[in-house]
Image: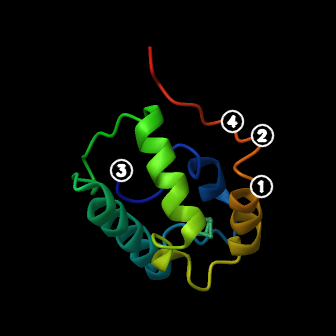
Amino acid sequence: MVEGPDDVCAPMLGEAENHCLCDSVTERDLKASEAVEALLKIPAGPGASIRPDADFLGRMRDAFSAGSIREGCARCEWSPLCTGIADSGFDGVLVKPLDC
Ligand code: SF4
């Protein structure tokens, strides 16, 4: 877990109107990590290391679909997209469990 923009967000940092460093994003990240910690009883803040095995992904996806770990999603412009992905059963999502 990293604080601030991760490798996925890094390419956007050069854009004129990137929002990755806004306080609202920092607050969203904090709410997300707190939700994961509350759900899984593991450290999930900056510096934590999480192995995304099948149990982890299953529990996270179940909770996300149920809306129980989405406090950080409030007012996020991507919420309809993420809700649709959850509603599809995460069909086509490329993140797979590391079970080897
Ligand atoms: S709606 Fe999607 S993109 Fe927005 S904070 Fe939630 S999980 Fe992240």
Query: Is residue 7 shown above or below 84?
Result: above
Q: Amino acid at mark 3?
A: Val
Find residue 21 and report its horizontal and vertical position in percent. Answer: 48, 69
Residue 2, numbered label: 3
Q: CA distance from mark 4 to mark 1?
A: 14 Å
Q: Are marks 2 and 1 in contact (CB under 8 Å)?
A: yes
Label 2 is placed on what type of residue? Answer: Gly
Q: Residues within 10 Å of mark 1 (few under 14, many from 20)?
A: few
Classify 98 as above or below 1: above
Q: Amino acid at mark 1?
A: Ser
Q: First in sequence: mark 4 or mark 1?
A: 1
**Circles 3, 2 touching at the beta carbon (< 8 Å):** no
Proximity of marks 4 and 2: CB atoms separated by less than 8 Å: yes
Label 2 sits on a secondary structure element that is: loop
Badge 4 amino acid: Leu
Q: Quadrant of ligand 1?
A: bottom right
To which residue does mark 1 refer?
88
The mark found on residue 92 in the picture is 2
- Ligand 1 has an atom within 8 Å of the beta carbon of the residue at disc 3: no
Marks 3 and 4, how far apart in space?
21 Å
The mark closer to the camera, 2 or 1, is 1
The alpha-carbon separation of the residues under discs 4 and 2 comes to: 6 Å
- Label disc, if present, on residue 94 of the rendered structure: 4
Circle 1 SS class: loop
* Pointer 1 or 3: first along the chain: 3
Q: Is residue 42 left or right of residue 7?
A: left
Left or right side of 25 for 35:
left
